[in-house]
Amino acid sequence: MSQPHRSICLELSPPYLVDGAPARFQSLWLLARLYYAGQYEDGVLPAAALRLRFPGNHAIRMLVSRAFADFARWGVEAGWGPPEPTPVALLNPAGRSRGPFWLPAASHQRLSLLVNGRPAERGELERFLGLRPEAPAADGSPLDELMQDLDYWSQLTQAMRDERDGRGRLAGRQAAAAFHAASETAHNDFQHALALVKESLAWRRSAQLDDSRMALKKLGRALAGSRFDSAQPTFAAMARIAEAWDCYARGEAPAAEACLAQLHASPELQPVFRYNPRVRFECLNLSALLHKQAALGDGSPKRAQAALQALAGALEAAYEADSIDSAQHVAANIGWCLWLFWQQRLIDGERAQATETMQRQAIRWLGLSEWICDRFGGGNGSAWNTVFLLRIARGNCSTALHPTLRGFRAQRPLPPAQLERILRLSPPPFSAAKGDSGWAMLAALTLEEHDQARLPLTPLQLANLLLETLWFQAWEQGVSHEACGSAARLLQLLPQLRRNERSFFRAELAALPQELLEI
């Protein structure tokens, strides 16, 4: 129900607000445009103006429907069709999206348009609506703008330092929060979008998917209202990739592939993919994961080859962009994919390569990833590197159900003494000098990093690390106190995992001596 005596404040500077609450940009734009039509034009806005302002939005009907739903929530009445004395409440919603649109006088009088908290001037309103290009800076204003931006760049620099210190692991949440703080001090669309892109990706790296999705929605509003034409394609591409990552994280692979396909199909965004190595890396890295998922699900050698080709391109892009963190991630992905695809006969289907040969090839890539972490201050590197290394090292062992303890311990995984010769890197990662005297010790050291909060792990990462710790403790020690403790801890963790993840671990546990699970 409308409240005729209450003023409604529209903040036209990012982050866009209506009465202090976040507002959808398209809805805010339409309401401000209706205000402008009533204040400076004939009061009527044709539907063609919407299509002109949002040419990439094919569902104008949905845009209008959402906007009028927002108007109702804000307590604003807007009309459609030829202006008549008929009350808005009696208008027929059928065909509303065909317009034209208009504001009743009472609604127009209640709107208060602001820019950075002060009343908007006509020129500022026109620039917000896209009716006037950005005005050149007045004499003396560049210095004022530079000093005004100093806080933002300081905040952004601190966030980047936090992220580098944490390498996406130790301070992932801290880095994301710092990027959020930077976005709050932004003074223009470019700054706002830059911080939001980094915030969304930082939240995703720290496995905070809801926070990542919230930052992504804010980014969409910032991009929709941006007026920095030369930079917009880059941010639009990153927003599309971030949206694709969000879909992938929720298990919606077709939607993620559709997002990337839209990026490749867009004449505006194709050059960004070609000439911006950071964008190219993110796109190819995610494409590789999507191809890998499809290859393993459908048993498709063609998708497996596509995954390896995408990973090779992603590695090139990572080094081209001087992103060493990206390089270590993609090196680990190459090693793990080589092993998985070989196991599933998606590559080397004729088995020209011996098991030990493929183990060495895959481990060399994992070693490169860990070596990069060591050389560039990543501490003990990635927990996934440890998990993948240990799983490949026992990849030639039996997976028969319910083995006897004696038969289980008679197996011969890859000897850890061969690791330095396989990796051929100096100083060698996973070395005895770091305390990694055996496979079980390597697993235990990484687990200790998590338990002491130096390497925070997600439940899925922790479950995988516990499984490898348990396997090698049982193989080296038998039914020891440590092995039984790892088994109990893994069983307690399973309810926190997804159903398909729980199925995997139960199958793996069934291939271990049952004495471990009965104590």
Image (tube, rainbow, N blue to C red):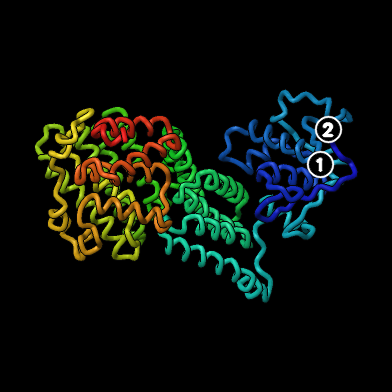
Q: What residue is pinned by disc 1?
A: 43
Circle 1 SS class:
loop
Vertical comparison of 402 with 104: above or below: above
Any part of residue 309 in sight = no
Identified at 89% across, 41% down, the residue is: 4
At which x and y percent is residue 17?
Answer: 71, 50
Q: How many marks?
A: 2
Q: Earlier in the sequence, mark 1 or mark 2?
A: 1
Q: Residue drawn 32% across and 36% down?
A: 519
> Quick one: 24 or 58, which is closer to the camera?
24
The reply to whether discs 1 and 2 touch (Cβ–Cβ < 8 Å) is yes
* Quarter residue 98 falls in: top right
Lateral position of residue 40 relative to residue 147, left or right: right
Of the 4 image quadrants, the one containing the N terminus is top right
Marks 1 and 2, how far apart in space?
A: 9 Å
Q: Is residue 104 left or right of residue 401?
A: right
Left or right: residue 436 compared with residue 184? left
Query: Which residue is disc 2 drawn over?
Result: 83
Can residue 503 be seen in this snapshot? yes
Residue 248 position, x and y percent, is 43, 38
Q: Percent x, y for residue 121?
A: 78, 58
Residue kind at label 1, given as amino acid type: Gly
Q: Secondary structure at mark 2?
A: loop
